[in-house]
Image (tube, rainbow, N blue to C red):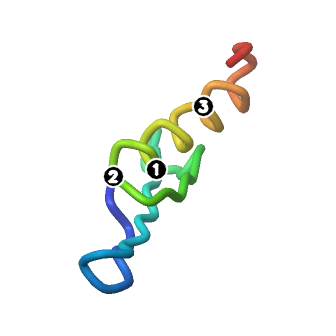
Amino acid sequence: MLVKQTGPDHNKAFVVNVCLNSNVIGTGTGRSKKEAEQMAAKEALVLMGYEA
């Protein structure tokens, strides 16, 4: 879920959360939505015990 989008069009920053059962289990930031989503997913996988 996209939490925050900041910065001018040429220098955006995105913050994304991964939620499971209404709990945030991963947060990622990046210069693109895709990068932020991948960082959040990686954090969530590590938290759940998977090697990412």
As drawn, the label of residue 23 is none
**Amino acid type assigned to the residue bearing label 3 in the image:** Lys
Outermost residue to the left: 9
Name the residue beneath numbered marker 1.
36
Q: Percent x, y for residue 39?
A: 56, 41
As drawn, the label of residue 33 is 2
Q: Residue at x 38, y 75 (%)?
A: 11
Query: In the picture, residue 50 is in which quadrant?
Result: top right
Along the horizontal axis of the image, is 48 left or right of 25?
right
Between the C-alphas of marks 3 and 1, the distance is 10 Å
Q: Residue at x 53, y 58 (%)?
A: 29
- Badge nearest the viewer, 2 or 3: 2
Name the residue beneath numbered marker 3.
42
Q: Residue at x 37, y 81 (%)?
A: 6
Q: Secondary structure at mark 1?
A: helix
- Answer yes or no: do the residues labelled 2 and 3 have beta carbons within 8 Å? no
**Amino acid type assigned to the residue bearing label 2 in the image:** Lys
- Answer yes or no: do the residues labelled 2 and 1 have beta carbons within 8 Å? yes
How would you rate the neighbour count of disc 2 (Cα within 10 Å): few for under 14, some for 14-19, many for 20 or more?
some
Q: Percent x, y for residue 19?
A: 45, 45
How would you rate the neighbour count of disc 3 (Cα within 10 Å): few for under 14, some for 14-19, many for 20 or more?
some
For residue 52, above or below residue 19: above
Q: Secondary structure at mark 3?
A: helix
Between the C-alphas of marks 2 and 1, the distance is 5 Å
